[in-house]
Image (cartoon, grey):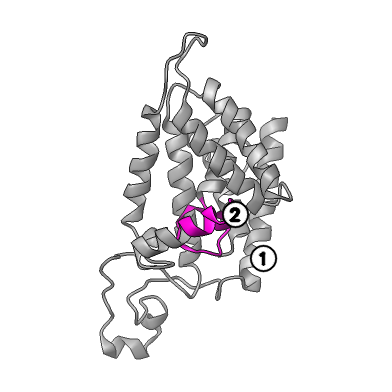
Amino acid sequence: MMGANHAITGAAAWVAVTSTATGALGLVPMEPGEMLVGMLVAAGAALLPDADHPNATIAHSVPLIGSAGASAVSGMVGGHRHGTHSLLSIPVIALIAWVLQFGTASVTWWERPIAWAPAIAVTALVCFASKAMKLVVSWPKAWVAGAMVGALVLFFAPEDPFWLQLAIVLGFCIHLAGDMLTVGGLPLLWPWNPKPPKAWRKTPIRYFWMPNGYFALPVLGKTGSILEWILGAAVTAYLAWVLIGSFNG
């Protein structure tokens, strides 16, 4: 999937889970304001698996440093659509999200500990989401938008950190689900990529369990296909519908 569609599906998944408006699941009900912040975080988290791609949205977030960081991640996980696109990556990102809650500091001039680690994470993720979803036109403006939301989290983050953990993990998993729907597939069992029996490689099974050991449900075809963009448009319409209902209900 393309970055914009990853972000919009991450946002839609979050709204579906947390909104109580018509059309949403309301599994983890939240107030509209909290839901909106979490939506941007989930949208940004939906771009994280592509931190292994030097040309991905994240890689352009900071000149030189972004692409260098993406290249370093790519080298560590074996390239694009390897380690960061496996089932193993999910508990890893969940652990990182969980650790963020301990990044707080008590100061004399504020009544509660300031959540500096969650604020940094939110700043970056909202920045990524803002640019990928074209809510802003430039990276400097994206960082400003991220910093504004991050500042709110710094001083007013909910005491229960579950919202941030859920947003990050949900967005991350939605990215994997989206890529699973393309012909590229995913190395779900990485670093082990079991190959299907040779006899199966001449049957339709090869489209689901690929000769290289990847797995797919390739209903969207190639990345960037017309089917992908139709899905993106439908998800965008759903997101707008639920958001309107959330704030008008």
In front here: 226 or 161? 161
Of callouts 2 and 1, the N-terminal one: 2
Q: Is residue 41 above or below residue 149?
A: below
Quadrant in which residue 58 is drawn:
bottom right
Which residue corresponds to the image point at 61% horizontal and 44% vertical from the top-left?
A: 127
Figure check: 120 above or below 59: above
Q: Secondary structure at mark 2?
A: loop
Q: Is residue 142 above or below residue 34?
A: below
Please, what secondary structure does the residue beneath circle 1 have? helix
Report the span colored magenta: 46-69
Image position of 133 (left or right of 111): right
User: Which amino acid, mark 2?
Assistant: Pro
Q: CA–CA distance between discs 2 and 1?
A: 32 Å
* Amino acid identity at mark 1: Ile
Q: Is residue 63 magenta?
A: yes
- Residue at (55, 61) in percent of width and height: 56
Residue at horizontal 36 percent and vertical 51 percent from the top:
90
Q: Which residue is mark 1?
A: 230
Q: Quadrant of residue 156?
A: top right
Say whether residue 228 is visible.
yes
Q: Is residue 116 magenta?
A: no
User: Which residue is denoted by mark 2 in the rendering?
Assistant: 63
210 over 91 or under it: above or below: below
Residue 133 bears which disc, if any? none
In this view, the residue in front, 38 or 209, is: 38
Disc 2 or disc 1, which is closer to the eye? 2
Where residue 73 appears, as percent x and y from the top left, is: 41, 58
